[in-house]
Image (tube, coloured by chain):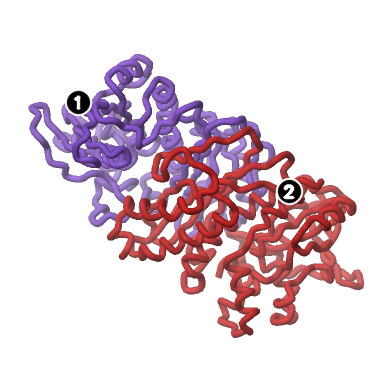
Chain colours: A red, B purple
Amino acid sequence: MKVSELGEFGLIELLAQIATKSRGEALLVDIGDDAAAWHAPASIQLATTDALIQDVHFTLSLITWSELGWKALAVNLSDIAAMGGTPKYALVSLGLPPDTEVEDVAQLYQGMAELARRYDVAIAGGDVVTAPLVVLSVAVIGTAESDVLTRSAVAPGDRIAVTGYLGASGAGLVMLKKGLQLDEETTTCLREAHLKPYPRVAEGQVLAQHGVRAAIDLSDGLVSDLAKVCKASNVGARLFCHQIPIHPLVRKSFGDDCLNLALSGGEDYELLFTGSVEVIDRVKGLMSCPLSVIGEIVSEEPGKVRLFDEQGKEIGIERGGWEHFAPGSDDELSKPGY
Amino acid sequence: MKVSELGEFGLIELLAQIATKSRGEALLVDIGDDAAAWHAPASIQLATTDALIQDVHFTLSLITWSELGWKALAVNLSDIAAMGGTPKYALVSLGLPPDTEVEDVAQLYQGMAELARRYDVAIAGGDVVTAPLVVLSVAVIGTAESDVLTRSAVAPGDRIAVTGYLGASGAGLVMLKKGLQLDEETTTCLREAHLKPYPRVAEGQVLAQHGVRAAIDLSDGLVSDLAKVCKASNVGARLFCHQIPIHPLVRKSFGDDCLNLALSGGEDYELLFTGSVEVIDRVKGLMSCPLSVIGEIVSEEPGKVRLFDEQGKEIGIERGGWEHFAPGSDDELSKPGY
């Protein structure tokens, strides 16, 4: 059945049923009322929104509807993670062509509800409208306990660290676009890295609670996102390439391209953060995921990121990462989605 | 200059400057961080989202960019108004073709910031992405003092009332689409009714504070929105057409079509609410806007709205209002936007 046959109100009822399966927190009114409502204790509140546009961020031939739902929510949870917060409620604004299959939309919501359940997030409401292509805009509201992690709290002398491994999402994008045939383990891992990222929510909370003040999630690419942090904090950065935790399967399958994928493939949704040597050492012992120190913050050249190899020789930066609207930003590697 | 020449990050900086002019509440971090953050006291929280899609909800030849920004925020504030709440923070997710003029986007944000200032709402953050057409998804977070107005709290015996006048927005849509030449006062009034609606925030608060429990804002159309309320509350409704407050300028210029425009033109963003005779009388004395009793709630035929003329004779309903994806929903009158 097409959504045009079911109609807006029937569709909203169906989606509300799927969404209620993910209710992490009690809502005061039914989904479908004019707005979502809940009791909130006094707190620092966080709110973020991110949109995914068909053929800009994703191509339906390469992503399942369920993965699309997961990813649309995941990129927003990652923003809350980068503040050290706890995501609580999601609002989903969905634009759909009238001939979209109802079953596909249900799958999309199920993918989103699956992630929401894992992170104890309630899909609290949303909007469904006609559109000539699929548009998915999600807003997430969360809370923070005390201090939040910001982009502007970086200080000269700070070490730069990242969670997890980098490059797997960018490599997954290349694999999917080029139809690369890789071994089963690599295929599964890279596909999931690109289409079903797990936002670092617990890790962000550990950072915020143990002295880290500055963080960003890696969505546009390591160099590009680090440059944003440097700009916001009016500092410069030195990255030591041999310390960058390139994903082992990317290193294995992508040869010389692997560093580039880690530097600017984008969409890894790991956390980049900075802190003194003592603070980084402290959080390292508390993290359940790998954590790598990859560089240091300097006071010179605010906003600029410089790269060095193992011998201390500077390396040129080929591309910084993804920027919407930027000239030349439509090449394969730097484009978000595929 | 095109947004593709300025680039994403330059554009975000420009929009952040405009947005900060509307800051009703203090934000803890700069716009452009991973998420917006603010201190919130314990309260009932409200959240809503609504998207406007180019050539579905609006046509750029008929709306200015400034009006588009105003309207995208207004429709969301209206949802908060329909809950009896106070809107506080807005997140703006913006999809733009790369050849969009930077000046146009600035105008869009200025229109939004103008409305935000009037209603003491802070534009707290957002997202800007490439899209093949203009997509504007706004999410608004608000608070409510005690009880919220819901769609499910209607009771048999309740009177049905609406704020303001109906039909002017639908008439404005027809005027713009058909290029009707009307007198200056009518032209200005209908254009503003359709493109720059003033959400009934103060009125919704009065309702919530003085005993009204059920309300909805009129976006899809009187009959359609009343039917939703009836369905959610498992009751039926009788509307008395001669009591419907058709806008005087619509009555003057649209002859026999005026009732239809009031019943299903949509997008009036007035509040429809129900309550006992005593409750309605009480709020009537407290409202600064016109308030009309237009019908009553019955226990029979749940979800059904029936219309009667002055002689008590039933009138057939030609169309109920706008429903996305519904077959035949692309005719001129029932389509939201133009």
| Element assignment for label 1 | helix
Position of residue A102 in the picture relative to residue B6 (left or right)? left
Query: Badge 2: how crowded within 10 Å, few (<14), some, or many (20+)?
Result: many
Q: Nearer the viewer, residue A261 or B117?
A: A261
Relative image position of residue A222 (x, y in whole percent):
73, 62
Three-letter amino acid code of the residue under disc 2: Arg
Position of residue A157 in the picture relative to residue A140 (left or right)? right
Marked residue chain, label 1: B
Please give the name of the residue rendered at 84% of the width and 51% of the height, measured from the top-left corner.
Answer: A275
Please give the name of the residue rendered at 8% of the width and 27% of the height, measured from the top-left corner.
Answer: B311
Relative image position of residue A91 (x, y in whole percent):
50, 48
Please give the name of the residue rendered at 61% of the width and 34% of the height, measured from the top-left corner.
Answer: A41
Is A118 rendered above or below residue B79?
A: below
| Element assignment for label 2 | loop
- Can the viewer see residue B144 in this picture? yes
Instruction: Return the mark for residue B243.
Output: 1
Three-letter amino acid code of the residue under disc 1: Gln
Labelled pair 2, 1 in contact (Cβ < 8 Å)? no
Q: Which image quarter: residue A180? A: bottom right
Please give the name of the residue rendered at 62% of the width and 64% of the height, measured from the top-left corner.
Answer: A197
Q: Nearer the viewer, residue B64 or B132?
A: B132
Q: Nearer the viewer, residue B95 or B282?
A: B282
Is A157 rendered above or below residue A145?
A: below
Q: Are marks 2 and 1 on the same chain?
A: no
Residue extending farthest to the top is B285
Relative image position of residue B131 (x, y in whole percent):
49, 59
Position of residue B25 in the picture relative to residue A203 (left or right)? left
Relative image position of residue B153 (x, y in whole percent):
35, 33
Marked residue chain, label 2: A
Residue position for label 2 = A151
* Distance between mark 2 and mark 1 Cα atoms: 57 Å
Query: Badge 1: how crowded within 10 Å, few (<14), some, or many (20+)?
Result: some
